[in-house]
Image: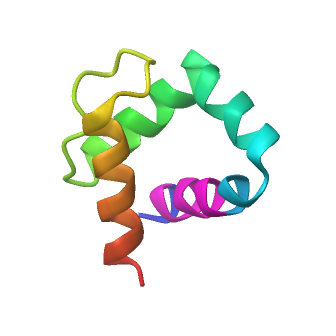
Amino acid sequence: MRLIGFLVGIAVFASAQATDWDELVQDPGTVRTVQQTLRAEGYDPGPASGELGPKTEAAVKQAQKDRE
């Protein structure tokens, strides 16, 4: 649970820094880690492909919403 909170925090921070966010979502290792963590927390980010697709985006947004 702490890891997903950390990852969501990174996503929120990085979304304010467009260049940093672009770099994070282009790194397949980072995206894969986020996907695996989301799945472990009960979200459906789609396959852990390392590509940021619509299911992963939706899962990140839901995780953020659940923590508001």
Residue at the spot 46% in from the left edge and 39% down from the top edge:
34
Q: Is 36 rendered above or below residue 32?
A: below
Pinpoint residue 64: horizontal percent, then vertical percent. 42, 68
Q: How many marks?
A: 0
Magenta stretch in the rendered image = 4-12
Q: For the point 62% across and 21% down, which residue is it?
A: 26
Q: Is residue 67 above or below residue 35?
A: below
The secondary structure that most of the magenta stretch takes on is helix
| Residue 49 coordinates in the image, percent (x, y) | 36, 15
Task: Identify the residue at image location x=26%, y=42%.
Answer: 39
**Left-right relation of 15 to 34:** right
Left or right: 47 with respect to 11? left
Q: How is the image coloured?
A: rainbow
Q: Quadrant of residue 47?
A: top left
Q: Residue at x 37, y 59 (%)?
A: 61
Left or right: 5 in relation to 20: left
- Please tell me which residue lies in front, 41 or 51: 51
Quadrant location, the C terminus: bottom left
Answer left or right for 38 relative to 34. Answer: left
Residue positioned most to the bottom: 68
- Which image quarter: residue 56? top left
Answer whether residue 15 is magenta in the image.
Answer: no
Residue 22 percent across, percent down from the top left? 69, 33
> In what quadrant of the picture does the N terminus appear?
bottom left
